[in-house]
Image (cartoon, rainbow, N blue to C red):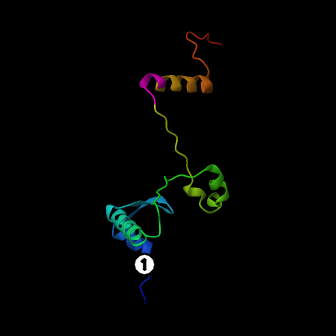
């Protein structure tokens, strides 16, 4: 009886090169993996240095228009997500929290009358 062929992805998991996140297609990458990518980028930029004027690196994001027309949601809806961030002082953060509480639950009234 033949042994089942182990997929390349499973081999990468077994060697600790990639780590499963529980979501198909979303994997944590080891330092070894990142080192290979960095070395390949260096090679490609060195090899093609006479053909390109500037190396460009884009952040891991895209415009909403590009996202909507990319077909990503149709093919990978389980991988879509958003990131929200802001910079604030502690007092500003508390102000935001209070504004959210008021918007979602209304003001707190002390000594509310009890209806029997």
> Is residue 14 found left or right of 83 in the rendered image?
left
Question: Residue 83 location in percent, x, y?
Answer: 52, 44
Choose top left, top right, bottom left or bottom right for residue 33. Answer: bottom left
The residue lying toward the viewer, choosing from 17 and 41, is 41
The residue lying toward the viewer, choosing from 37 and 43, is 43
Question: Residue 115 location in percent, x, y?
Answer: 65, 13
The residue lying toward the viewer, choosing from 70 and 45, is 45
What secondary structure characterizes most of the magenta part? Answer: helix
- Please give the name of the residue rendered at 41% of the width and 67% of the height, measured from the top-left corner: 45
Q: Is residue 110 magenta?
A: no
> Looking at the figure, which quarter contains the N terminus?
bottom left
Which region is colored magenta?
88-92
Choose top left, top right, bottom left or bottom right for residue 16. Answer: bottom left
Choose top left, top right, bottom left or bottom right for residue 73. Answer: bottom right
> Is residue 4 found left or right of 103 in the rendered image?
left
**Outermost residue, bottom side:** 1
- Please give the name of the residue rendered at 55% of the width and 11% of the height, measured from the top-left corner: 110
Secondary structure beneath label 1? loop
> Looking at the figure, which quarter contains the C terminus?
top right
- Please give the name of the residue rendered at 36% of the width and 64% of the height, measured from the top-left corner: 38
| Residue position for label 1 | 6
- In this rendering, the answer to whether 104 lies above or below 82 is above
């Amino acid at each position: 009886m033949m042994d089942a062929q182990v997929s390349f992805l499973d081999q990468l998991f077994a060697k600790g090169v990639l780590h499963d996140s529980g979501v198909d297609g979303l994997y944590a990458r080891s330092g070894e993996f990142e080192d290979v990518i960095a070395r390949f980028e260096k090679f490609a930029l060195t090899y093609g240095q006479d053909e390109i004027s500037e190396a460009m690196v884009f952040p891991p994001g895209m415009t909403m228009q590009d996202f909507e027309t990319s077909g990503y949601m149709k093919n990978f809806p389980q991988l879509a997500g958003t990131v929200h961030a802001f910079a604030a002082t502690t007092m500003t953060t508390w102000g935001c929290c209070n504004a959210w509480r008021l918007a979602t639950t209304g003001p707190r009234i002390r000594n509310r009358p009890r209806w029997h």
